[in-house]
Amino acid sequence: MKIVTLGGGTGQAQVLKGLAARGADVTAVVGVTDNGGHSGQLRREYGLPAVGDLRQCLVALADPRHPFAEAMNLRFGAGSLDGASLGNLVLAGMTLQFGSLTKAAERIGSAFGAHVFPVSDKTSQVCARLMNGKKVRGEWEIIRRSPRTRIAELFHDPPIAASAQALRALKRADLVVLGPGSLRTAIVSILLVKGVAEALRRRRVAFVLNILTQAGQTDGFSAADHVEEISRYLGKMPEVVIANTRKPPDWALEGAEFVDPIGLDHEGHDLLEPIERADLKRRKRPSRYVAGPHLVRHDPARLASLILTLARRMR
């Protein structure tokens, strides 16, 4: 049974970790329009697609005992490379050397035993057209916009097409899992890539709801609003919606709201990741990132178990 995940960053990596631990045949197709942090810096300096989310997915599917996998997540803490990710630098260098991000991902993936592809080898920005007619270009510009005028539609500038490898993976999938992740600038951004939504029309799709709303993207969104937004760009309703049903602790809700699936037709379980005492203090610290810290996450084991159960049921 072939499972393909679409998303970006921490959310997609959590899904991959859980599925890999259960020996699932899983492939990741990863977005390329993130323009923040070190990945964004590499984009600006070298004209590359975003590499940061791809790195996270490669590491998530790698054997944790592989010495290079652990090194891929190393971040420099001082000097001119302060904040830079070693894995991002490796992917950027190999992209320049081999001519495409897909080829770089294939080289590293073969060493890790991981199937991870960028959705496109082209570079673009996700953009929003606001209800007042104004245009905002770039993921982090969308998140930071002030005032937070409602978004009317999302698009790419310039338009980009999916890579042959990404489309091949999607067309072979028995189940495609969308999310979790930034709804509009990650998941919808992947669906905007030419060829992706079309490839998913005949595939079974499961959509994993985010646990919390995200500032600048889904302020005030209900669970139904999340599903409606995905369906708009997917071109159909997902066959199944997966949702966490337990409200996170109050300390995790600052600046966000619980996406309560009540009233929504969904597969619902307590999917919150257990929080260790050591994590609690670290996660409660104020974040220097505009989008906020990942205060609560889906538990990889619980989420993977549910996905595999649904996949068997949907065959």
Image: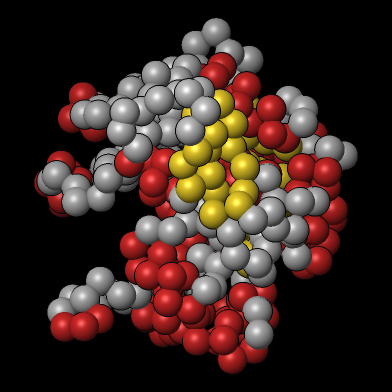
The outermost residue toward the bottom is 97
Q: Is residue 173 above or below residue 179?
A: below
Between residue 123 and residue 260, name the one nearer to us. Answer: 123
Q: Residue 231 appears in which quarter of the rendering?
A: top right
Left or right of 6 in this view: 135: left
The outermost residue toward the front is 133
The residue at the point 42 percent across, 41 percent down is 142
Q: Is residue 6 above or below residue 233?
A: below
Residue 91 seen in the figure: yes
The residue at the point 52 percent across, 28 percent down is 133
The residue at the point 43 percent across, 52 percent down is 10
Number of disc labels: 0
Q: Residue 238 appears in which quarter of the rendering?
A: top right
Q: Residue 202 appears in which quarter of the rendering?
A: top right
Q: Is residue 234 above or below residue 269?
A: below
The outermost residue toward the right is 202
Left or right of 170 in this view: 299: left
Residue 19 seen in the figure: no
The residue at the point 84 percent across, 38 percent down is 201
Q: Pinpoint residue 57: horizontal percent, then vertical percent.
A: 52, 63
Between residue 153 and residue 246, name the one nearer to us. Answer: 153
Left or right of 119 in this view: 289: left
Q: Please state, as top left, top right, bottom left or bottom right, where the C terminus lies in the image.
A: top right
Left or right of 20 in this view: 56: left
Q: Pinpoint residue 11: horizontal percent, then vertical percent.
A: 47, 47
Q: Pinpoint residue 199: horizontal percent, then vertical percent.
A: 83, 47
